[in-house]
């Protein structure tokens, strides 16, 4: 299951409340909906500031550190070469893109969740896809809102990785986003994904902040 839409984001807290009871209430609410208890805590930006220490004392641990990276679109496009092959853009989640989501998901439940999220993203948006050997090899998604382009769903089929396809997808999405009025872009990438971070850094993306998912068990 995806962490971003299944975690408590502690951004504000009433100091008059009891923190232990608040944690218990949040975890009970999640469990009642079939979700594993989880808090998404950004480094240096959670409320109350004592929450990480309190969770640690209760046996919770951080998992999956993730970077939020941003760039100005003009600079990113200037750094990226033009796509070597034609990138198809569509506002609809078509079946070849859905197939990549399925093939790169860790489980059928994760696939169903990610596919549903992709289908529900608001307009203006564009899915991008590249073909290799007659089948879809790489995909991505950009959603524009208030001058920002959010880059999601960057996926490359395992058989076609390390061929620069993600770079081509990113270039096409940013070009579309600029035409749709966006001036800046952001994306999220796991800190352990060194190849993806290198790609984004080469395209002028810099880390704005990081966050982790806190869970009460040792396994992520």
Image: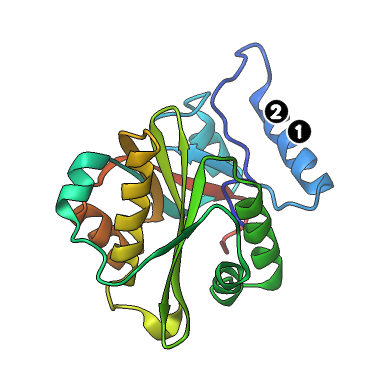
- Residue at image position (35%, 40%) is 179
Contact (Cβ within 8 Å) of mark 2 with mark 1: yes
Image spot of residue 161 (x, y percent): 35, 78
Residue 44: name its quadrant.
top left
Name the element at disc 2.
helix
Image spot of residue 212 (x, y percent): 47, 47
Q: State the residue in front, 1 or 128.
A: 128
Q: State the residue in front, 181 or 150.
A: 181
Within 10 Å of disc 1 (Cα), the crowding (few <14, some 14-19, many 20+) is few
Scheme by which the image is coloured: rainbow
Q: Is residue 86 left or right of residue 138?
A: left
Compared with residue 9, is residue 35 higher up or lower down, i.e. above or below? below
Residue 17: name its quadrant.
top right
Within 10 Å of disc 2 (Cα), the crowding (few <14, some 14-19, many 20+) is few
Q: Which mark is residue 22?
A: 2
CA separation in Å, label 2 and label 1: 5 Å
Q: Is residue 219 visible?
A: yes
Question: Which residue is denoted by mark 1 in the rendering?
Answer: 25
Q: Number of labelled discs?
A: 2
Compared with residue 88, is residue 117 higher up or lower down, i.e. above or below? above
């Amino acid at each position: 299951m995806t962490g971003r839409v299944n975690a408590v984001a502690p951004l504000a807290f009433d100091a008059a409340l009891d923190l232990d009871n608040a944690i218990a209430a949040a975890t009970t609410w999640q469990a009642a909906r079939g979700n594993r208890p989880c808090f998404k805590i950004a480094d240096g930006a959670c409320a109350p500031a004592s929450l990480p220490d309190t969770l640690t004392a209760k046996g919770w641990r951080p998992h999956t550190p993730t970077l939020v990276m941003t760039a100005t679109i003009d600079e990113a496009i200037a750094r990226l070469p033009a796509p070597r092959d034609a990138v198809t853009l569509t506002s609809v989640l078509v079946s070849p893109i859905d197939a990549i989501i399925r093939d790169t998901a860790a489980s059928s439940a994760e696939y169903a969740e990610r596919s549903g999220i992709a289908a529900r993203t608001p307009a203006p948006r564009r899915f991008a896809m590249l073909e290799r050997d007659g089948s879809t090899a790489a995909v991505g998604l950009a959603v524009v809102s208030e001058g920002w382009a959010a880059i999601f769903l960057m996926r490359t089929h395992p058989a076609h990785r390390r061929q620069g396809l993600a770079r081509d997808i990113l270039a096409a999405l940013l070009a579309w986003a600029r035409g749709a009025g966006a001036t800046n872009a952001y994306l999220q990438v796991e800190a352990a994904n060194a190849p993806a971070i290198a790609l984004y850094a080469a395209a002028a993306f810099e880390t704005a902040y990081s966050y982790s998912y806190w869970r009460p068990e040792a396994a992520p």
